[in-house]
Image (cartoon, rainbow, N blue to C red):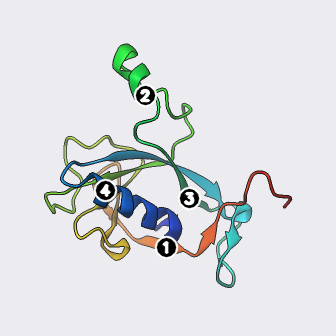
Amino acid sequence: MPTYATRALVSVLCELAADADPDSISVRLAATPTGDLRPTDGQIGLDSETPVLSEFYFPDAGSSLSGVFGMDLAAPTGQTAGRFVSHPDGDPTVSVTDDLHATVLVAVPPWNVEDVRAYDRDNERLDLVLVDAETPDPEAPI
């Protein structure tokens, strides 16, 4: 089963990884049903309920609270569908130190969108399909 993510999200995540290099980053990801996305180039071509990784929670958000309480308070519980991790060492596989989710996206240098890989919780590689769509502006009428 493939993993779907917006091209814009993966591009931004690769930029974050490049900015953090030589340190790694770990970012929680949220999914949006396809029916709630706006295509940027033609039609999306997926069932309207298909989840597409489309948004992220900044890695530093809530870090002071997590340092005190030992838990991540930056992302709402149960609302993250995946995780993005960067591996500056160039290893494109999930490592034992990565925080696992149902879906994990792994990026390696030179931080190109095409080099990002997807894995499931069991470390099995998944097809990553990039979708040319964006989430609607919450302030704009649909």
Q: Looking at the picture, which amino acid does disc 2 mark?
A: Asp
Residue furthest right in the image? 141
Q: Position of residue 92 (x, y in %)?
A: 21, 63
Helix, strand or loop at label 3? It is strand
Q: Marks 4/1: CA distance?
A: 22 Å
Helix, strand or loop at label 1? It is strand
Seen in the image, is 30 located left or right of residue 140? left
Mark number displayed over residue 72: 2
Reading the image, the residue beneath label 1 is 130
Q: Is residue 19 above or below residue 98?
A: below
Q: Looking at the picture, which amino acid does disc 3 mark?
A: Ser
User: Dots 3 and 1: beta carbons under 8 Å?
Assistant: no
Q: Which residue corresponds to the image point at 39% horizontal and 71% vertical from the top-left?
A: 127
Q: Which residue corresponds to the image point at 46% horizontal and 68% vertical from the top-left?
A: 2
Residue 6 visible, this orientation: no
Reading the image, the residue beneath label 4 is 19
Q: Marks 3/1: CA distance?
A: 10 Å
Q: Is residue 101 above or below residue 6?
A: above
Lower sequence index among marks 4 and 3: 4
